[in-house]
Image: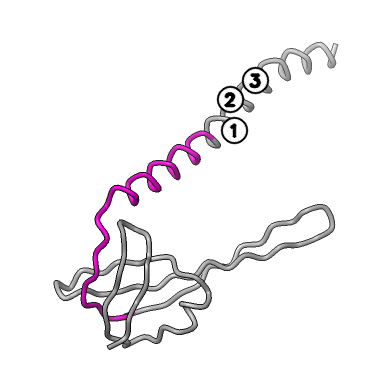
Amino acid sequence: MFYAGFDILFSILFPILFLVVLGMILYTIIGNVRTWNKNNHSPRLTVPAKVVAKRTEVSHHMDNTMMHTFTTYYVTFQVESGDRMELTVSGSDYGMLVEGDIGKLSFQGTRYLGFERS
């Protein structure tokens, strides 16, 4: 009796759960492709800016018996108008930038291209 109820529950919940997970994966992929496409169609700009903040985000991923750690580096720049933008940068660029640095920021959409200190 218990197994019959479990079969019905499993036959209903499994497809629903599968579709939810598939939908989340597709949503993420489509969002990433949209951002990539928007960045490619944005103009490359170079503007005076100041480094106002830096932060890191560390994430962990367990793969069988190995734990992998990934660090994402972010820098917040303030442009002449007072607007601020946080961009993802490489680890080497993150290490070279210091809060308070003033220079020319090059970017394309949300894509960091470089920073030349003045």
**Mark 3 sits on what residue?**
15
Question: What segment is highlighted magenta in the picture?
Answer: 26-52
Q: Is 91 rendered above or below residue 36?
A: below
Q: Amino acid at mark 1?
A: Val
Q: Is residue 40 magenta?
A: yes
Image x and y of residue 85, in percent: 30, 66
Q: Amino acid at mark 3?
A: Pro
Image x and y of residue 91, in percent: 53, 74
Q: Nearer the viewer, residue 20 or 99?
A: 99
Image x and y of residue 61, in percent: 69, 57
Which circle's residue, 3 or 1, is located before the other in the chain?
A: 3
Mark 1: few/some/many CA within 10 Å (<14, 14-19, 20+): few
Residue at 80% in and 60% down: 66
**Mark 2 sits on what residue?**
19
SS at mark 1? helix
Q: Left of 103 or right of it: where is 9?
A: right
Q: Are marks 2 and 3 in contact (CB under 8 Å)?
A: yes
Residue at 32% in and 85% down: 117
Q: Quadrant of the C terminus?
A: bottom left
Q: CA distance from mark 2 to mark 3?
A: 6 Å
Q: Amino acid at mark 2?
A: Leu
SS at mark 3? helix
Mark 2: few/some/many CA within 10 Å (<14, 14-19, 20+): few
Image x and y of residue 76, in percent: 34, 73
Q: Nearer the viewer, residue 106 or 19?
A: 106
Q: Are marks 2 and 1 in contact (CB under 8 Å)?
A: yes
Residue at 27% in and 83% down: 103
**Mark 1 sits on what residue?**
21
Q: Nearer the viewer, residue 71 or 42?
A: 42
Occupied quadrant, residue 54: bottom left
Q: Is 89 rendered above or below residue 26?
A: below
